[in-house]
Amino acid sequence: MPAPIPTSIKLQKASRSLRLAYADGKEYALPAEYLRVYSPSAEVRGHGKPVLQTGKQHVSLAGIEQAGRYALKLIFDDGHDSGLYTWDYLHELAVNQESRWQFYLDQLEKAGASRDPHTSAVRFIP
């Protein structure tokens, strides 16, 4: 069964999020950083080997474009604008936001990386 199509899509620049509402009454606010690090683009998905996105804490959505009847193209202020967010993928990101976000934070920690673009981790090996 295909995922539902949002009945309302709002870009909220002040909170740097995309707000989705569905016919069942459920609403989700997806932060731009979350959408950026889980971009469906080849740059992020890495052709089968995902590329960990770092330093995206302050990224914002600059715009949204509809891609046919099946997806959105999100335009981020860091210049990233590739990858189409299908209705299925957006719904999956929405309903699994908490677990996906925790997985991302765990991956950052494991890599010694940061969400902050002004921070870089240095590891000293004895």
Image (spheres, rainbow, N blue to C red):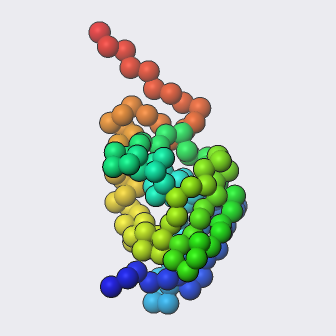
Whether 25 is drawn above or below 49: the answer is below
Q: Which residue lies furthest to the left in this view?
A: 126
Q: Where is residue 54 in the image (x, y as percent from the top left)?
A: 49, 40
Q: From this view, report whether residue 5 is shown above or below residue 83.
A: below
* Residue 2 falls in image quadrant: bottom left
Q: Quadrant of residue 91?
A: bottom left
The spot of residue 29 in percent (x, y) is 54, 69
Q: Do we see residue 105 in this rendering?
A: no
Give residue 109's position: percent from left, percent from top.
Answer: 36, 38
Instruction: Name which quarter of the figure residue 17 lies in.
Output: bottom right
Q: Is residue 37 shown to the viewer in this render?
A: yes
Residue at the top extreme, as displayed: 126
Q: Which residue is drawn at 50% across and 90% down?
A: 23
Left or right, 26 with respect to 2, comes to right
Residue located 49% across and 83% down the image: 5
Image quarter where the N terminus lies is: bottom left
Name which residue lies at 60% across and 62% down.
74
Q: Is residue 50 left or right of residue 71?
A: left
Question: Quick one: quadrant of the C terminus?
Answer: top left
Compared with 104, 61 (above or below) is: below
109 or 79, nearer to the observer: 79
* Number of on-image labels: 0
- Residue 28: image x %, image y %? 50, 73
